């Protein structure tokens, strides 16, 4: 037991030393991933959220009471296990069903691989979002470890045509996986400004666009890089050197929307995505939102409450909650995101937004205009304030 405590303390001090080194000698770790003209969200050096940056704002508990601040203190408590967070399972069983090689026409099949990685098959295209097959999400073999193996074994993954990379955080941009995909399939990789430089470090070419930029994939199919609310960094000192984004994939049978990783911000990014046409399938994050007990969202991560609002604004007919249940990044219990999502959706009188099992291909229904039940603001507020919602760990 003493040896384990010694090893844990040694690892903690190594991590602290690395963080200090990164802060003290940023000139060795900083990088200019993108050079271009200044814009409303780029000052010539770093990108920013035009609706305001609140990534490290103190956590707020229900009732407006501030919770423990995020940042270094939160990281230390997290690493030492002294933050009182609920226990997670060490392993989650995954029952895989191999996806088909292709899905033709307007039919659509979605298979959750884990975290923000989803395989979407339609129009003869195999599309992957933020692919991560590595065991850990972090640099130098460090970082959170998977509690669930990928929902599709890499060897059973069909040939990939299109990869969407939302930003440069390790749990979304896995260079080892991207290199494997490139060497095997040579897919078209689409991302936002500056991330092509990072992906290029693995020898993988990528197409980078600013928000609003478009890439034609084939007749009737194009990718539009769209705004969301987040931040980027690989080594802390290179903060916001590359842009973050969501995506709209315009398709004949109704669009695919991938939110990437995002906080709420002004939430108008969902309205902007909806303006490109009907959203048949929306992939929206619902996890890693809690960094103190009772917190329902953080500056850079939406929780189920804001996710449902984004889904409503998108006008999507089907939504799947992602960014949960794979890497432990925050405070909430393992199954809080899907449980809270189901409760919030009932409160809002919406349907069609839920979660799917890892490794189980799901057929996505044709687009149909969403139907919402009439819910008064008072009834909605009372429902969201109920113990069933408030007391989830």
Image (tube, grey):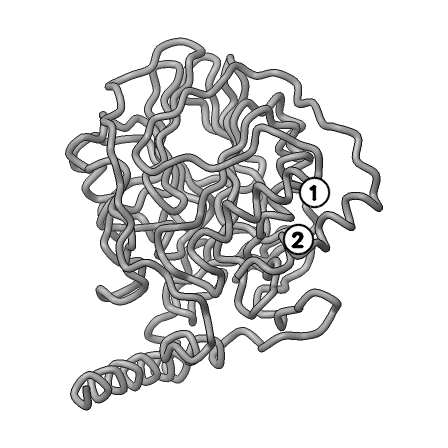
State the separation of the CA atoms marked 2 and 1. Answer: 8 Å
Q: Where is residue 185 shown, x and y percent of the image?
A: 21, 30
Answer above or below: position of 125 versus 22. above
Answer above or below: position of 382 versus 191. below
Label 2: how many residues lie within 10 Å, few (<14), some (14-19) or many (20+)?
A: many
Residue 198 appears in the rendering: yes
Q: Nearer the viewer, residue 236 or 345?
A: 345
Label 1: how many residues lie within 10 Å, few (<14), some (14-19) or many (20+)?
A: some
Residue drawn at x 53%, y 67% is 291
Q: Where is residue 356 shown, x and y percent of the image?
A: 42, 35
Q: Where is residue 149 shown, x and y percent of the image?
A: 24, 46
Judged left or right of residue 283, residue 105 is left
Quarter-of-image position of residue 77: bottom left
Judged left or right of residue 159, residue 86 is right
Judged left or right of residue 197, residue 333 is right
Split into 4 quadrants, where in the image is the N terminus? bottom left
**SS for dot 1:** helix
Q: Where is residue 308 shown, x and y percent of the image?
A: 63, 41
Q: Nearer the viewer, residue 63 or 316?
A: 63
Q: Nearer the viewer, residue 373 or 266?
A: 373
Residue drawn at x 66%, y 28% is 315
Quarter-of-image position of residue 119: top left
Residue drawn at x 40%, y 54% is 168
Disc number for residue 71: none
**SS for dot 2:** loop
Disc number for residue 265: 2
Answer above or below: position of 297 versus 316. below
Label pair 2/1, CB-CB below 8 angstroms: yes
Dot 1 corresponds to which residue? 268
Q: Nearer the viewer, residue 145 or 20?
A: 145
Residue 248 appears in the rendering: no
């Amino acid at each position: 037991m003493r040896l384990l405590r010694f090893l844990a303390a040694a690892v903690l001090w190594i991590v602290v030393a690395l963080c200090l080194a990164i802060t003290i000698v940023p000139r060795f770790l900083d990088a200019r991933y993108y050079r271009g003209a200044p814009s409303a969200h780029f000052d010539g050096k770093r990108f920013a959220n035009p609706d305001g940056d609140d990534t490290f704002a103190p956590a707020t508990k229900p009732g407006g009471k501030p919770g423990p601040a995020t940042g270094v203190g939160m990281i230390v408590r997290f690493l030492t296990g002294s933050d009182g967070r609920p226990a997670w399972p060490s392993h989650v069983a995954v029952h895989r069903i191999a996806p088909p090689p292709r899905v033709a026409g307007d039919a659509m099949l979605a298979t959750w691989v884990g975290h923000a990685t989803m395989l979407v098959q339609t129009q003869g295209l195999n599309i992957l979002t933020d692919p991560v097959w590595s065991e850990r999400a972090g640099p130098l073999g460090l970082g959170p470890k998977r509690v669930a193996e990928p929902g599709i074994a890499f060897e059973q993954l069909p040939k990939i045509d299109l990869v969407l990379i939302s930003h440069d955080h390790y749990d979304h941009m896995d260079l080892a996986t991207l290199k494997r995909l490139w060497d095997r399939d040579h897919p078209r990789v689409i991302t936002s400004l500056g991330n092509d430089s990072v992906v290029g470090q693995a020898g993988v070419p990528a197409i980078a666009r600013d928000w609003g930029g478009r890439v034609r994939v084939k007749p009737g199919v194009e990718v539009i890089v769209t705004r969301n609310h987040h931040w980027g960094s690989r080594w802390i000192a290179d903060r916001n050197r590359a842009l973050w984004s969501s995506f709209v994939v315009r398709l004949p049978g109704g669009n695919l929307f991938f939110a990437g990783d995002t906080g709420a911000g002004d939430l108008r990014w969902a309205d902007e995505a909806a303006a490109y046409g009907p959203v048949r399938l929306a992939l929206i994050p619902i996890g890693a939102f809690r960094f103190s007990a009772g917190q329902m969202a953080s500056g850079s991560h939406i929780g189920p409450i804001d996710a449902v609002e984004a889904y409503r604004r998108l006008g999507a007919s089907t939504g799947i909650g992602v960014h949960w249940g794979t890497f432990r990044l925050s405070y909430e219990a393992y199954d809080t995101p899907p449980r809270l999502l189901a409760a919030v959706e009932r409160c809002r009188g919406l349907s069609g937004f839920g979660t799917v099992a890892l490794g189980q291909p799901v057929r996505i229904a044709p687009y149909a205009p969403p139907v919402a039940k009439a819910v008064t603001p008072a009834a909605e507020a009372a429902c969201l304030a109920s113990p069933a919602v408030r007391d989830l760990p």
